[in-house]
Image (cartoon, rainbow, N blue to C red):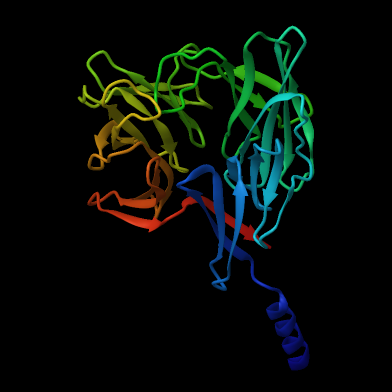
Amino acid sequence: MLLLFCTCLVQAQAVPPAQHWDVFLLRDPASAETTTLSFINLLSGEASEVEAQGSQFALTTLGVIYLDNEDKAVKLAQNDGTIRKHHFIDLAASDHSIDWVVSADGARIAWTIARQLADETLTTTTWLADSDGDNLRELLADRPRAGIRLLPVAFRPRSEQLIMEVRTAEVVGTSPYMLRAGLFVLDFATGDINSRQLPGEQHCYCAFGVGADVMLRLVQSDAGGFVAKVFALESGQTKVIEALPVADFPYAGNLLVSADDSLAVYAMSQVEGEAGADSRFRTVLARIDLLAARQEIISRSLPTVVRPIAFSEDNSALLFTTVNAGGTWKLRLADQAISKVADGVYLGRMIDS
């Protein structure tokens, strides 16, 4: 029995532990298209870097997917330092555009490919697959439309649903943030794909965020500041959280909802002159307490546009990045202390089994 126990113990110890990699993206200040991807092994301390040129970087369980704009090809950068053409997402030379979104655990990816027809209308096809290519399926083939394509926005956490946007080519207003309208959801739990509109004003170009069961929209109030409209996606209940009394921050976005639906954060910005690529922005971070139904400013004014990345330390801290300086920063919510975490932008954690 002792021999059998020792044999089982040796076999159990022989199973290698899962490898955790933190992944960062560092942009070359001289060239926005040139980046360095860093993979850092949290267990062994091993690190690797790979240079990649492109955009739309997103972390999957296999590595970082991105669009090589020069080659017009979808590629995958991996933690062994290699780059290869993506094994199942392909972009043809005649395709108009491609967009994708990855689930929070990196295990699924949804993408849309828009193609321009002879009459210059666009038709969009939406696909879904596991990050390794398994369970690949077409979700939706949209009819031809003039100047309109579909975009994947987010996977709804812990569900078989994908949130989509109907995007018009027309520019509606000017903002440093991504605003969305025409939102709907695709339910892919069964073989029959069902779609339905999401609640709220479909023609409002507003900041958007989604949690496990809540969806938020930020709507500018007449008195200044932004009202948070909260929609419970399962029950259909809605509530409105009053705006902060700040009239000098006309732009808001980059809305992030915590995994437990208890709070959300977003960025509010002001600008000198008209908003544009060379504008000088100042930004504060605001927190929405979804349980107590109130808002508060939680940071000092920062001289750039800010994007919250993730909550950390049991929602007591926030990771964020800045548009001008890049890097990853941490904000402690208790005392509003800010410290730099890394020179690169944190893309997330990849786990190898």
Q: How many marks?
A: 0
Left or right placement of residue 245 versus residue 327 in this view: left
* Outermost residue, bottom side: 2
Q: Is residue 5 above or below residue 127?
A: below
Q: Quadrant of residue 7?
A: bottom right
Closer to the camera in the image, 310 or 341: 341
Query: From where the camera sits, is residue 316 visible?
Result: no
| Residue ID at (38%, 41%) | 324
Residue 80 image point, x, y percent: 67, 63
- Residue 6 appears at what percent x and percent y? 72, 89
Image quarter where the N terminus lies is bottom right
In this view of the protein, which residue sits in the foreground, 56 or 314? 56
| Residue pictured at 62% horizontal, 59% vertical | 351
Image position of 184 with respect to 105: above or below: above
In the displayed structure image, the side of residue 253 where residue 72 appears, left or right:
right
Can residue 132 be seen here? The reply is yes
Residue 231 is left or right of residue 269, and the answer is right
* Place of residue 107 in the rendered image (x, y in percent of width and height, measured from the top left): 66, 47
Quarter of the image with the C terminus in it: bottom right
**Where does the image place residue 58, in percent across and percent down from the top left?**
59, 44
At x 36% / y 30%, what residue is drawn? 278
Q: Is residue 243 above or below residue 262?
A: above
